[in-house]
Amino acid sequence: MNKSLFTYSIISFLIIFFFGFNFLFSLLGNILILLFLTPILLIGLAFLKINSFKSKFKVCTNCGSTMMGDSKSCLYCGSNFSEFENNKTYSENASSETIEIEAEEIN
């Protein structure tokens, strides 16, 4: 008989004898849970990293070029980003900002 097979059978017999089948089932269950949940955790971390990477991009409202970083002005056209961020004003009354559109049939 193979020596390693004999050793593993003795070890498994001792584990079952001392801890019972409940230990063996819980050990196998925990290993399967780790095998299934680890990829889900890694996918979640990758999703968070991609979203944080996307938040670092800036799009120039003057020329439309995309840049990454904390620069104060556009590298291509030279427009200032802080001017555009400061000019963002929002109306308190949103209904006054909406546009009414009427549909017409075209013959």
Image: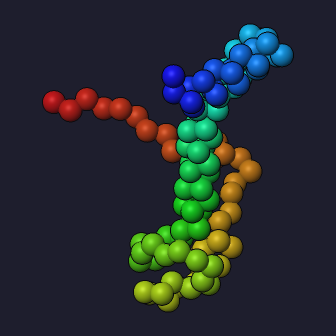
Residue 84 in the figure: left or right of residue 92: left
Residue 65 in the figure: left or right of residue 93: left
Which of the colour schemes (rainbow, by chain, secondary structure, one colour) is used? rainbow
Tell me the residue at 48%/87% (across/down): 75
Q: Is residue 59 above or below residue 95?
A: below
Q: Is residue 2 above or below residue 58?
A: above
Q: Between residues 38 and 96, which one lies in front from this camera angle? A: 38
Residue 12 in the figure: left or right of residue 23: left
Q: Provide residue 79's location: percent of width, then percent of height.
A: 52, 85
Tell me the residue at 71%/47% (across/down): 93
Quadrant of the rendered image containing residue 19: top right
Tell me the residue at 70%/24% (across/down): 11
Q: Between residues 105 and 12, which one lies in front from this camera angle? A: 12
Quadrant of the rendered image containing residue 41: top right
Quadrant of the rendered image containing residue 27: top right
Q: Is residue 71 above or below residue 46?
A: below
Q: Is residue 83 above or below residue 4?
A: below
- Regarding residue 97, the answer to whether it shows in the image is no
Tell me the residue at 56%/30% (across/down): 3
Q: Provide residue 14's location: percent of width, then percent of height.
A: 76, 19
Q: Provide residue 12's location: percent of width, then percent of height.
A: 69, 20
Q: Residue furthest right?
A: 18
- Regarding residue 85, the answer to whether it shows in the image is yes
